[in-house]
Amino acid sequence: MNSNLYIVYNVVKRTTIDENPHNIKDIIELYKLLLKSDAIVNIEQHWTPNGLESELRVIFWSEAEYDEWAAENRVKYDDLILSFHNAHSAADVEFNRYTSNDEYVSKFPYTYYPPKNQIICWTLLPLHLDWFVKHIIPIGNMIDYKGNGIWDKSPDLTGSRFLKERTSSIVRRPHDLSTHKGKIPTWLLMYTFDHAMQTAMYDQPYIYRRFMQLTRDAETLAETFIEDCDHAAVLIGHESLDNEFIVHTHRVTEENRLTLTIAVRVTFNGTGLTYKFWDPIPDDDPNLLGYYSSPALLKRSYTDQRQPHEFKITARSSILVFSGSHVPHSVTFDNDLYLFYVWDNVNFKPGMLEKIKQNSQYTFFQDQEQVKRLYFYNL
């Protein structure tokens, strides 16, 4: 547990599992107060195996941020706490409230939450993770369009991906897909991420607000590094899509350029995601252009004969720069949700690639030309 966090523990003990002292309206009002605030890291609900004791843990970034939040919501907050006490007393259920300043020792395990940063200051609640997995991820399923209104799920590509709308000065350069006709899978159609998130606007306004802001913030950060790109996308990683995102390459165009990815982790249920990168494909490989549209060919002809470089990412967000068209790559998922904001074939602003290189915690392929090297660091 991060020692700087400030936690409010709401502990309930009952004699039978049939007792339900909760006023659902009060609970909804409390969540509405909490979820509007950037002071909140997460809200955790824990139960003993017999269901007789529960602990609702509200985690703030610091005691100072809790004090500020409480002052802003003092009247409503105090009314809700009083209502909870009265409801539990009437039901003969023991209710106690503790904070990090008390000597209360929780019997439930703690989760480590990395520090917030300029991209993300919150953690997605389990309830909202479940909704996102069920309702947003399927919109981005990679579906093969056969024409004549016929759709067919691709047997080789699994995942969830969206186009990334432009919300900054980053130019999307026009490019001629017909240059490599048949080598770029134009039959895999995509929605924009913004369009997909509109489905959450009314039923899940918290999810809509959080992810729309996250997506704008990601592009704002990317804007500090790059001037333009060929293509921008949002990819989603979660074990519901399969254990692993199939090894692949992407976006082979006339000029070799690097790909910029901002990876964002929004839950902390597992141990972290594992990146895998294989040695860059030589320019003279006769199958280079065909690997984008045929991951099976890539595995059979190239990666099955080689061992990948791999490492975990555990931070809230990170920067990755590498050649998406020459470096085969894959991801092993767990029960955490990741979003990958990807800008393909970028031109960096003056000095910004050097800044990335200086900050890099993992640097691969130093023996290769600059456009095929890999740089990674946590934000």
Image (tube, rainbow, N blue to C red):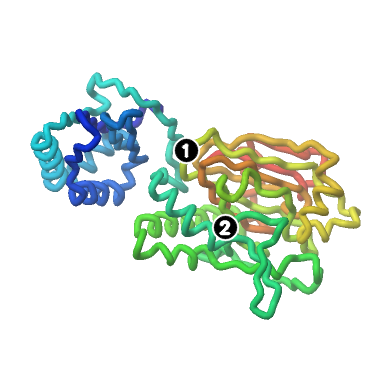
Residue drawn at (23%, 41%) of the image: 68
On screen, residue 171 above or below 52: below
- 1 vs 2, front mark: 1
Report if residue 354 is visible in the image.
Answer: no
Name the amino acid type tagged 2. Val
Instruction: Give x and y (percent) for residue 171.
Output: 60, 67
Relative height, residue 175 to residue 158 (above, below): below
Quarter of the view holding residue 15? top left
* Residue drawn at x 59%, y 39% as measured from the top left: 273
Q: Position of residue 156 (x, y in %)?
A: 72, 56
**Residue bearing mark 1:** 268
**Residue at 59% across, 60% down:** 141
Which x, y percent locates residue 116? 43, 40
The amino acid type of the residue labelled 1 equals Phe
Left or right of 131, for residue 96: left
Q: Crowdedness of circle 1 by 10 Å Cα count: few (<14), some, many (20+)?
A: many
Toward the viewer: 111 or 87? 87
- Locate residue 291: give its quadrant: bottom right
Q: Which mark is residue 234?
A: 2
Picture mark count: 2
Residue 366 horizontal side relative to residue 20, left or right: right
Q: Quadrant of the N terminus?
A: top left
State the CA–CA distance, disc 1 to disc 2: 20 Å
What percent of the width, then of the height, locates residue 225? Answer: 59, 53
Label 2: element kind: strand
Label 1's element?
Answer: loop
Label 2 CA crowd tier, 10 Å (few <14, some 14–19, many 20+): many
User: Which residue sits at x=75%, y=44%?
Assistant: 373
Judge from the rendering whether residue 327 lies leftward or rightward of residue 311; answer left or right.
right
Tell me whether circle 1 and circle 2 mark residues in contact (CB < 8 Å): no
Q: Is residue 181 visible?
A: yes
Kindly identify which numbered label has been placed on residue 122. Answer: none
